[in-house]
Amino acid sequence: METKERYIISAIVEHKPGVLYQVSNMFRRRGFNIETITVGESEQVGLARMTVTIKGDEKVVEQVVKQLNKLLDVVKVSILDPEFTVSRELALIKINTPNPAVRSDVINYTEIFKGRIVDVAHDSLIVEMTGSSEKITAFIELMKTFGVKELARTGITALPRGMKSTKME
């Protein structure tokens, strides 16, 4: 059985309504699953950067890139090499803290993981955690022992390291 690797695809797209729909619809039509997707304006006026993570093998990724390149509003597509890529994710985690001892433990773990407490309520804390997906997953797994009330993750956003660029030249 082939192992499925995680691939990060960076696409420069027209920054206008309907582009995200076109891209997600292409994935749906082809039967590809999007693990995470982030979109936001780029440093280039009128263009947005879309970061998509998928799991699959090289053949699947090549097919995704070919299909993305066929879309009119997609300007450039790159597969990012994880070794030479800076990637980050943001998560907000609401954790059950029914008493001072639990609250203290959660605060200590948050500090160890270099997170931030962004909201305090009588029976819960909301922690902001940024970093690698693996770090965030490890923190969430640890917090499950206290009770994760709610969770929101942004998905990965990424840029190639150094002078390598995914922007249009």
Image (cartoon, rainbow, N blue to C red):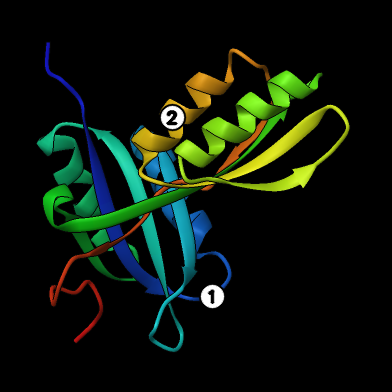
State the image quarter where residue 45 is shown.
bottom left
Residue matched to label 1: 16
Measured from the top left, where is residue 146 in percent x and y?
65, 16
Callout 1–callout 2 Cβ contact below 8 Å: no
Q: Position of residue 108 (x, y in %)?
A: 57, 33
Residue found 36% across the figure and 50% down from its top:
52
For the N terminus, give its image quadrant: top left
Please, is residue 4 above or below residue 86 in the view? above
Q: Nearer the viewer, mark 1 or mark 2?
A: 2
Where 134 sits versus 118, above or below? Answer: above
Q: Which mark is residue 129?
A: none
Can you name the residue that lies furthest to the right here? Answer: 122
Q: CA distance from mark 1 to mark 2?
A: 33 Å
Element carrying mark 2: helix
Amino acid type, mark 1: Lys
Residue 18 in the figure: left or right of residue 87:
right
Q: Is residue 16 left or right of residue 4?
A: right
Count all numbered tags in the image, as a single digit. 2
Q: Residue 69 location in percent, x, y?
A: 24, 62
As drawn, is 51 to the left or to the right of 7? Answer: right
Q: Which circle's residue, 1 or 2, is located before the other in the chain?
A: 1
Evaluate whether residue 80 shows in this view: yes
The label number, if any, that marks residue 137 in the structure image: 2
**Residue at position x 84%, y 27% from top?**
123
